[in-house]
Amino acid sequence: MLNTFLTRNKTVNTGIGKKKKRIKRFIQQRWLIAMIVPAFLILFIFHYIPIYGIVIAFKNYRAPLGIWGSKWVGFKYFIQFFQNPFHWRVLRNTVLLGLYSFLWGFPAPIILSLLLNEVKHARYKRFVQTISYLPYFISVVIIVGIMKEMLAMDGIINNTIAALGGERIGFFIEPKYFRSLYVISGIWQGLGWGTIIYLAALAGVDVELYESAIIDGANRWHQMWHITLPSIMPTIVVLMILNVRGILGSDTQKILLMYNPSTYETADTIQTYVFREGIEGAQYSYSTAVGLLMSVISFIILYITNKIAQKTSDYSLW
Amino acid sequence: MKKMRKITGGLIFDVFNYVFLFAIIIIMAYPMLHVVAMSLSKPGAITAGEVSWFPRGFNINGYQYLMKDEELLNAYKNTIIYSFLGTFFTLTFTSLAAYPLSLSGFVLKKPFTFYLAITMFFSGGLIPTYLWIKDLKLLNTIWVMVLPGCISAYTVFVFRSFFQSIPGSLRESAYIDGANDVLILFKIILPLSKPLLATFFLFTMVERWNSWFDAMMYLNDKTMHPLQMVLRRLVVLTDPTRSTYAHGDFAAMVKLGHLHPKNTQMAAVVLAMIPILCVYPYIQKHFTKGVMIGAIKG
C-alpha cells in the first residue's frame, strides 16, 4: 500500500518535471521546429486540406456555396455510380489493365536479369543495360507520341503490314488493340529499369556457389535454376507484394494520352472516368465519390496484401 | 567428358542469349532511331514511307522551323523554370524536414513522422485537390507547378536515414562551438550528403522535365505551358496526316516539298529528349539509389 503510494507520488513528481523539461526542450529546439515548418505547411495545404475536401462526395457541391454550405446528400452519388451502365466497364478495365500489366510486366525484368547475369563479356552486358534503361527516362507524352507515329495509318508498322500484303490496322481506333498497346509500351519502358534491383541482388551472390556447382556437374541451366533464381527469390517476393497493390493503379496519365472515345470500351478506367466527369464535366461531387470508392478498394487490397506479407515473410510495408 | 559437355552446352546457350539480348537492344533503340530518322529525312521519303531507322536524304528544315517557333521556345523556358525551381524546393524543404527527424532527441520526432506517414496512405484525390487549388486562386500561377508535389514523405524518410548515417559527433562539436542547427545542416550535414543530393537532384529534374499532367489540370493559360504540353498538342492530339501549324509559312514550306509535318513533329520529340540524353550518363552513376526512389513511387 505504502509502496504503491510512494511510487505513484514519484511518478507524479517526475510527470511535472517532465512537462517543465519538455517546454524547455521546445525552446531549446526552436530552430529544429522552425525547420520542419515549410514541409509541414506544404503537406497541410496541398495534402491534408484536400483530404477534408472528400466530404463533398457526400454533399451536393455547389461552388458558390463552398464545401461547408453545400447540402448533405448521403450516399446518393455512390448509388448513382452503381446505377450508371458504365460502372461495370470502368471497373473491368481498371482491373484488367492492372492485371495484364502485372502478369506480363512482372516476370519480364526477372527473365532479362537472369539472362544478363549469364553474359560473359562485361562490356556487352553494360551496353545492353545502358540501352535498355533509357526508355525509363522518356516522358509518357513522348512515348505515346512515338507510338502514335509508328502505329499511324501511314506509319512504319502499317507500311510494313501493307508491304507484306496485309490490311492496314487502326491501332488507336479499334478497342481490341488498346490493352496490348498499353501493356507492351509499359514493358518497353520499364523492362530495363526493372532489372536493376535484381542485378543488384545478384551482385551479392557468392561466386563459390557457382564454382562448386560446376564441379558437381551443373550446366548453365542448372546454375541458373538452382543458384541464381533462389538468390533473387526474396527480392522477387518483396517486389511482387509492392506490385500487387499497384494493380488498381493503372497508369492514368498514359491512358489519358492514348485513349479516345472510340477506345473507351477497353481503355476507360475509374481514374480516367473520374477525370472526365470531374474536370471536364464539372460533376465534382459525383466524381469525388467514384474516386473515393476506388481509394477505399485500393486501401483494402493494400491492407490484405500487407497482412499476407507479414504472415508469409518478414517483410511488411509498415 | 563432363568438361566437354559443359562447354558445348554453354556455347549454345551463349549464342542464344547474345542473340536474344541483341534483339532487346534493337527493340529498345529502334523507336528512338526511327524518330531521329524521321526528323531528318526528306519529305518525299517520308510520304513514300521509306524511312526506317536511318534518315533518307538529309533535311533539317524541321529543326530550323522549330527554332523560330515562339510557342515551343517559350515552353522550353517554362519547363526549365519549373524544373529548377521545383527541384530546388524539393531538395531544400526535404533537407530541412529530414534533419530534425534524424536527431534522436527531437521533441516532435514522433508526431511529425506520423504526420508524414499519413500522407503516404491517404490523399484527397484528383477532384478535391483541384477544387482546393482553384479556391486558393493558384490556377495559372507558377506556384501550382512548383509547390504541391515538392514534399514527399518517402523522400523525407530517405534523407533522414542518410543524415542518420553521418556521425553525430560532428554535430555536437559544432553545437559546442555555438553553431545553430540551420547552420549545422547547411555547413556540415549537406556538404557530406552530396551523393544523396546529386541523386535526388537528377531524378527530380527528370521527373519534373517529363511531367505534363499538373500543367493540364492547373494551367489554362497556354503561354505558361511547359514543353510536354506543347509536345502533347504536336504529337499526341493531332492527326499526323494533318498539318499542326496552319499558318502560311509552314503550309507554304509543306506545299513546296521542303518540309513534311512529321519532320517538325519528330524534331520536337528529339529536342525534348536531348536534355534527358545529356544528363543520362550522370544519372547512370546513381541508378541503384534511384531505383529505390522509383520502386516506391511507382
Image (tube, helix red, strand yellow):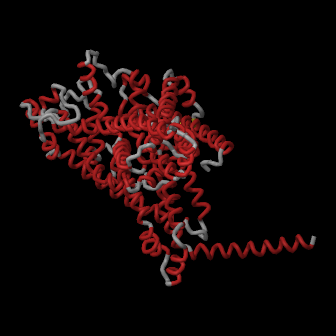
A275 lies left or right of A1? left
Which quarter shows the N terminus of chain A?
bottom right
Going by the picture, which residue comes out furthest to the right? A1
| Closest to the observer, B77 or A305 | A305
User: In this rendering, does residue B127 appear at all?
Assistant: no
| Closest to the observer, A298 or B5 | B5
Q: Residue B275 in the image: x percent, y percent? A: 27, 51
A275 lies left or right of A303? left
Placement of A95 over or under B161, stated as above or below: above
Q: Residue A59 in the image: x percent, y percent? A: 54, 37
Q: Write down the quadrant of residue A150 in the picture.
A: top left
Q: Write down the quadrant of residue A306 in the picture.
A: top right
| Total marks in image | 0
User: In this rendering, does residue B194 appear at all?
Assistant: yes
Residue at 35% x, 40% y: name it: A140
Q: Residue B37 in the image: x percent, y percent? A: 20, 37
Going by the picture, which residue comes out furthest to the front? B1
A243 lies left or right of A139? right
Q: Residue A29 in the image: x percent, y percent? A: 56, 73
B259 lies left or right of A233? left
| Closest to the observer, B14 or A147 | B14
Placement of B98 over or under A65, stated as above or below: below
Placement of B277 over or under A158, stated as above or below: below
| Closest to the observer, A103 or B203 | A103
